[in-house]
Image (cartoon, rainbow, N blue to C red):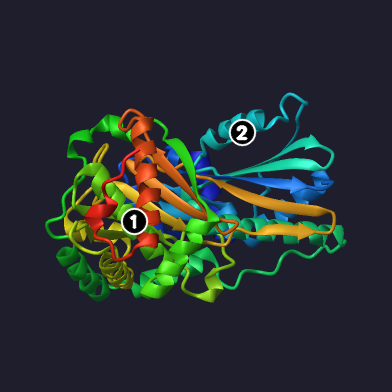
Amino acid sequence: MSGDKRTLLKQWLANGKASLQPLTFPQRELWEASPVSVTDSANHICCLIHLRGVIAQQACEAALQRVVERQEVLRLSFLPGKDRPVQMIRQSGEANFRFRELSSAQGHQEAVEELAKEIFSEPFDLVRGPLYRVDVLRRSADDHVLVFAIHHAIADGWTLGVFVQDLCMAYVQGLMGLHEGLPPVPLTYAEWGAGERTFWQPAELERRAAFWKSNLAGSCRLWNSLEGRETASGAHHRLVSLIPVDLANAARELARVAGATLFSTMLTAFQVALSRWTGEGDVLVGTPVANRTRQSSRETMGYFAGIVPLRGQVEPDRQFSGSLSAVHNETVNSFANAMPFAELLPALGDLPAPGHNPVFEVRFAFQNHPVPDVALHGLSARLRMRSTGTARFHLGCEITVVMDALEVVWLFRPNLFPLAEIENLSYMFKAVLADACRSPESRIASLMTRTR
């Protein structure tokens, strides 16, 4: 940092225009537990918000400004520190907003998608900030696409829903001629981080680390031969499939009868399919958890989510119903013993290396955070996340509820897995789930025989 910037920073801190906070535990995971640089665009969270209705540029920018004033992470950047970076939260900040008129050729969906990819991939300056950007693309007088990109260090999936709600509320305020800002959040991100640091004392960390040392003892990596610098480079490709409503409802009914959750049911089917695909019976995946256990945190934008390893033993002679019960119990115990991933790794002695994600290589996510569709008089907003994955994992499976059906997004690198292999895995996953729903007492071996 230059001398002029240091002087300016000291002035901001002295007059209260900025404050410094330690990294939260999820933020530490990005800096300390990932084989990928925090500056990599794989750490950008992206979404498109389709807006229908007449929208005024000035009113939209004013609405975003209200959200910036309410949500401190939109005024947050990071400064180098002695041991690790620190958060710098500015007291005020200007909305990072662009409004673009698209030509008829640019307004086609394919062209909009390409423009959105360019916006998503633009790097963020972690020191200067801001660590988000909003572009409104006008396709016609009443048809707009809002492109929202935000760095993972200040956001998770839940954050996107909060952003949409806040932005729409602020826009309505402007239409009503109200000049006051949005109400303050019940709990700021800095306050949440301070509470987490108070809770995670050495005794609590040691108690939970003992569970994980026992739980993960003897676990093996699925693809040691694939590890290397090249596995942590390049963007993921996406394969999207759909589990139709009738099969999704059958899975929900199977979960109800078994006294399990839809998450555990989908995870069990995924473990069976992954075991068939890899030939390994010991399957270890990582799954994100929201970490928003307090109601006061649910209106706050920020990176709250944690990561929990989930280990499963796929036994061919076992009935699917028995496997589901075992997976459900294992999941409950694992969630109950969840601890910050940045603290788990030194306890296990597993540190990141280029092309090597610690503990597991597969991400399995069930996206059940609020994704609102907002309808107001003369205006509607529909949010759709763009699963970009993260360069630290070899393979990702993200499941999202869409109109009672289940959208499954597979994230992979073609230099590791050809598209045909991922298509086969997707087919097996759906086939295992369908067979299990029809006959939950069937042996696992009978569910593992189908390939495309």
Along the viewing direction, whichever of 273 and 13 lies nearer the viewer: 273
Observer-nearest of 128 and 236: 236
Q: CA distance from mark 2 to mark 1?
A: 32 Å
Amino acid type of the residue tagged 1 in the rendering: Ala
Query: Going by the image, does 13 lie left or right of 287?
Result: right
Q: Residue at x 84, y 59 (%)?
A: 377
| 274 left or right, relative to 383 | left
Outermost residue, left direction? 218
- Quadrant of residue 348 within the rendered picture: bottom left
Q: Position of residue 167 (x, y in %)?
A: 70, 56
Label 2 or label 1, whichever lies nearer to me, is 1
Label 1 secondary element: helix
Specify whether 412 is left or right of 374: left
User: Nearer the N terminus, badge 2 or badge 1?
Assistant: 2
- Considering the image in quadrants, where does the C terminus appear? top left
- On residue 113, the disc is 2
Category of crowding for the residue at label 1, using alpha-carbon neighbours closer than 10 angstroms: few (below 14), some (14–19), many (at least 20)? many
**Local SS, label 2:** helix
x, y (%) of residue 153?
Answer: 46, 51
Q: Which residue is mark 1?
A: 269
Residue at the image point whose x is 32% and y is 73% from the top = 336
Q: Farthest residue in the right direction?
A: 177
Q: Nearer the viewer, residue 309 or 200?
A: 309
* Image location of residue 89, percent across then percent down: 54, 56
Residue 217 visible somewhere in the drawing: yes
Up-down relation of residue 352 to residue 185 (above or below): above
Numbered circle sitting on residue 390: none
- Residue furthest top as drawn: 105
Query: At label 2, which amino acid type do we have?
Result: Glu
Few, some or many residues within 10 Å of mark 2 (<14, 14–19, 20+): some
Residue 215, image x and y in percent?
A: 18, 65
